[in-house]
Amino acid sequence: MGHTLAEKIIAAHVVDEDGVPAPREVWPGDLVEVSVDLVLANDITAPIAIGEFERLGVARVFDPERVVLVPDHFTPNKDIKSAEQCRLMREFARAQELPHYFEVGRLGIEHVLLPEQGLVAPGDIVVGADSHTCTYGALGALATGMGSTDIAVAMATGRVWLRVPETLRILYRGQLRPWVDGKDLILYTIGQIGVSGAHYQAIEFAGPAVERLPMAGRFTMANMAIEAGAKAGLFAVDDLTRAYLRGRTERGVVYDADPDAAYARVVEIDAGAIEPQVAFPHLPENARPARTAGHIAIHQVVIGSCTNGRIEDLRVAADILRGRQVHPAVRCIIIPGSQQVYLDALAEGLLEAFVRAGAVVSTPTCGPCLGGHMGILAQGERAVSTTNRNFRGRMGHPDSEVYLAGPAVAAASALAGRIATPEEVLA
Amino acid sequence: MTLSGKVWKYGDNVDTDVIIPARYLNMSAPEELARHCMEDLDPTFAGRVQPGDIIVAGENFGCGSSREHAPLAIKGAGVSCVIARSFARIFYRNAINIGLPILECAEAVDDCEPGDVLTVDLTAGAITNARNGRTYRTAPFPPFVMAIIAAGGLVPYTRERLQRAGARGGSPTR
């Protein structure tokens, strides 16, 4: 019997009681202790992790090169309490001499930033105190979100305990339609399997339609594995992955799932039949074709986030917004995912296209995605957003609504003042 | 270890954004977070919850964000235990790591009504509902997880392990 990608990566990282490497075959359900290649926290989760780290009675982090801190959520500091949290994190980074602490002006949204900076490599185990850490599965890494206490222990010891997950394999067949990208595939998938459809499992995304999917779309899909309850969402490493990694990192071990690997379930999806999607409030599983949304007037559009804040996403939005005007009733907020994405968008003239269309361009931040700042919704307001969650109150008032979509539907909706498809506004 | 308390019952997919909305994530003290616990789902909860009360919910409790503020808010509010049909995995880990007892038991959840009084024997994995007199059994935690709970959470558990490894001459931090 063979093994899945997740099983192989975990097997290679097993350690014994003293943290000494002790690789061994593992099976779903096994509880193992593993070494980690990278540990991550942000300005929301690091303060608790630092407090717990100090309670452990360990003076230094296990390896300063492998602890990454990114103040991206409530920055630039939105209020005094946030400023204090960021200061605590900054002082810890300085005291521990962490080379991968990223300051405002040099940062990005963590899950856009880390791959871009070459900090994640294939075959790594990455743990982050952020649920969307699963994004790095796009690079063939086993990456998963945990809480602050787990991360405190990982910072101190370089180890975590894991339950080896079962694997759900999803095969995407067919040719994608125009304006359909990774976001539409993953929203459609969650619509099919539900928000706990991959409960505690690893997802392997495979099949011809994703083999042709650019890296940006793969990051988007892996990013939302958590929205189906998954521990991780992984892609096999191929030429597109290698091209992305070139010049970023030399590290990495490439694993392939065995042909006779045991899967908990295999789901086949005809990707050629998928239309641009929108997920209605208040769960990501409420996905349906945007074409069938009906007349839903909106007040705000957000294009950005760890899900869709990459240059490819901004290009799609610019293709629709360029030379047109955002609807008078809509505030359109565009957030490049990192300083590099911002510079690229500047060089390509995308930022000018956005501003001339009547959109606002923000510095990289998680900001509105989680109702932090930079675009909070009032009671009764509705937003179309390229972010990842549409839970009740996620972007502001508990009686506001978030509709999730990809950048094409979001940009089209910004022009129409209601949920719309690109075809409708470009006609 | 036995707990007893009055039931607050909620549905499926109670996410961490409603357990503790992000607008309060600029702080992390449990007693501060507790004042806003469940605010966007049930604004009456934080003002009326009594020490020892028990949250009972459906599938996928604690889904969404990894924020440990969610179990901290619940624990800070004095809730003694959460019983659900199932838990989202990050919440599950976080609750064990900070020493908030959680149990999966579909039958106990389905039979339970708001205001019922439950008695929970954590060691035996038994839940008794005073209204109908029934006792429900839950699957025991794996020994490794039980050891974390017995130590009082992941930090004390790890601290003890590091001390033992140090005494053995092992290399606790590689």
Image (cartoon, coloured by chain):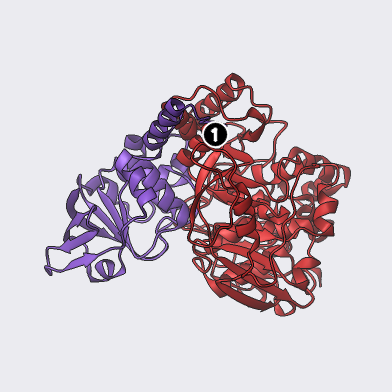
Chain colours: A red, B purple
Which of the two residues, B12 or A65, is positioned nearer the viewer here? A65
Query: Taking A251 as reference, is A80 left or right?
Result: left
Q: Is residue B20 visible?
A: no
Residue A141 seen in this snapshot: yes
Residue A398, image x, y percentages: 44, 54
Secondary element at image label 1: helix
Q: Which residue is mark 1?
A: A155
Front in this rendered view, residue A289 or A360: A289
Question: A157 or B16: nearer the eye?
Answer: A157
Residue A206 falls in which quadrant of the image?
bottom right
Q: Is residue A315 left or right of residue B140?
A: right
Q: Position of residue A363 (x, y in %)?
A: 70, 38
Q: Residue A373's spot in the image, x, y percent?
A: 56, 41
Total residue callouts: 1
Q: Residue furthest front?
A: B168
Asked where in the image residue A327 lies, by quadrant, the reply is bottom right
Q: Residue at the spot x=53%, y=60% of the render?
A: A165
